[in-house]
């Protein structure tokens, strides 16, 4: 019995650590960063690199690396901001490219003392710059809406998930004036942090349309301060491929070399202590994951899929999923294979993962982390 005591004490220490993480995730304070001066925009191209497939057009180079009027959050001339509110999101979408330029999480207050000040994950603030872009690439700019070229239209400027509704769909539309129309659909679900993003191409141009979809995250290297004196939490990139599984790519590595990997499924993400932003393309196709150093302490991680040919009179849809929110284990697992690995347990992973699974199972029944820990501790003592 005496030999079991050190093991039980070690397990109890892990439980306390998991409780600390759960408490911090739900109630911990997260400091608001200081204001910083605007940075100068880079001239590095920020669209996906061309691939070697002859049937897919090579993307044109772009000199813009940010959403319009960077640092202000204001739309560029001809575009406007569309606001979306659900139970878990307060978003701003710029009709230039349909880029999500702001994402506040109303269920995630910065601290208990300031419940009205909530976590903002995506922002055009120059110091904490972080946006989610997506678009299509065709044979030229007039044949597909790219994130930095196309101005969409929206039926209204405010969309709200009404009480009693489980989902909300927002549609932006674009056409080239020559019979090609693209509808960009966003579908939000109550209680969930994943967003279905679809580009629906309707081709009535009289000629075959060839193009592909891409999705990318742009982020500064800003790192949040933590109140832990004994833990260092990872901030940086993360990718997942069928071959190599989950791989972290920190900002230094993104500066040294570009990611260029082809895989079935896969996804790209930026991670920080409590939260993750990830683009998950269609998982039943071959996708290319890529990265770029945009200079001025900004980085890009993205993915693009295979090209499609759409004959005149036909319609095709490109679908992907954007996850923006806290690292909730259950939701991450349901979005994509391996996405739960963005929840980093460090060197305690071998012990912590199964223990957290037990804790989470108990929590699902009792609905309170404190009681879950007490019950789990009792189980350990019984063992």
Image (cartoon, grey):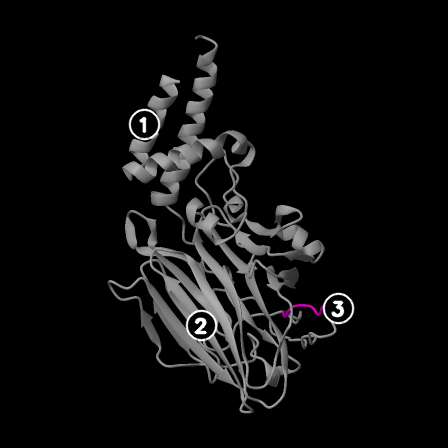
Between the residue at mark 1 and the residue at mark 3, the CA separation in whole angstroms equals: 57 Å
Between the residue at mark 2 and the residue at mark 1, the CA separation in whole angstroms equals: 45 Å
Q: Secondary structure at mark 3?
A: loop
Marks 2 and 1, the one that precedes in the sequence:
2
Q: Secondary structure at mark 1?
A: helix
Task: Report which residue position mark 2 lands on.
Answer: 185
Q: Nearer the viewer, residue 42 or 7?
A: 7
Question: Relative to 376, does residue 163 appear above or below in the rendering?
Answer: below
The question of residue 47 being in magenta is answered with yes
Q: Which mark is residue 52?
A: 3
Question: Relative to 67, does residue 257 appear above or below in the rendering?
Answer: above
- 383 left or right of 233? left
Q: Residue at x 55, y 86 (%)?
A: 313
Question: Relative to 283, does residue 23 appear above or below in the rendering?
Answer: above
Q: Which mark is residue 375?
A: 1
Mark 1 nearby-residue class (10 Å; few <14, some 14–19, many ≥20): some
Can you see residue 231?
yes
The outermost residue toward the top is 2
Secondary structure predominantly adopted by residues drawn in magenta: loop
Between the residue at mark 3 and the residue at mark 2, the CA separation in whole angstroms equals: 29 Å
- Give, as a single range, the part of the protein colored magenta: 46-52
Residue 33 at x, y = what percent? Answer: 44, 54
Residue 92 at x, y = what percent? Answer: 41, 69
**In which quarter of the view is residue 5 placed?**
top left
Marks 1 and 3, the one that precedes in the sequence:
3
């Amino acid at each position: 019995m005496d030999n079991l005591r050190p093991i039980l004490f070690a397990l109890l220490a892990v439980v306390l650590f998991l409780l600390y993480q759960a408490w911090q995730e739900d109630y911990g304070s997260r400091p608001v960063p200081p204001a910083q001066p605007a940075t100068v925009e880079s001239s590095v191209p920020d669209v996906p690199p061309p691939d070697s497939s002859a049937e897919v057009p090579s993307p044109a180079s772009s000199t813009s690396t940010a959403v319009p009027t960077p640092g202000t959050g204001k739309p560029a001339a001809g575009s406007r901001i569309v606001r979306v509110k659900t139970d878990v999101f307060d978003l701003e979408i710029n009709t230039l490219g349909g880029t999500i330029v702001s994402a506040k999480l109303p269920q995630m207050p910065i601290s208990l003392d300031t419940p009205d000040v909530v976590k903002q994950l995506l922002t055009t603030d120059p110091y904490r710059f972080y946006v989610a872009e997506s678009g299509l690439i065709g044979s030229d700019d007039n044949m597909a809406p790219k994130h930095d070229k196309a101005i969409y239209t929206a039926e209204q400027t405010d969309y709200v998930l009404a009480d009693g509704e489980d989902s909300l769909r927002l549609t932006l539309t674009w056409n080239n004036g020559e019979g090609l129309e693209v509808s960009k659909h966003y579908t939000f679900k109550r209680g969930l942090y994943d967003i279905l993003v679809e580009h629906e191409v309707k081709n009535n141009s009289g000629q075959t349309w060839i193009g592909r979809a891409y999705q990318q995250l742009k982020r500064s290297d800003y790192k949040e301060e933590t109140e832990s004196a004994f833990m260092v939490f990872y901030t940086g990139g993360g990718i997942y491929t069928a071959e190599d599984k989950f791989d972290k790519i920190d900002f230094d590595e993104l500066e040294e070399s570009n990611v260029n990997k082809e895989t079935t499924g896969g996804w790209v993400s930026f991670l920080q202590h409590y939260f993750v932003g990830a683009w998950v393309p269609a998982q039943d196709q071959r996708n290319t994951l890529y990265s770029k150093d945009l200079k001025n302490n900004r980085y890009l991680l993205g993915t693009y899929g295979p090209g499609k040919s759409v004959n005149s009179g036909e319609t095709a849809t490109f679908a992907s999923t954007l996850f923006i929110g806290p690292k909730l284990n259950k939701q991450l697992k349901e979005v994509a294979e391996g996405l739960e690995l963005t929840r980093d347990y460090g060197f305690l992973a071998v012990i912590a993962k199964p223990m957290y699974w037990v804790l989470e199972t108990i929590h699902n029944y009792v609905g309170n982390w404190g009681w879950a820990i007490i019950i789990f501790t009792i189980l350990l003592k019984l063992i």
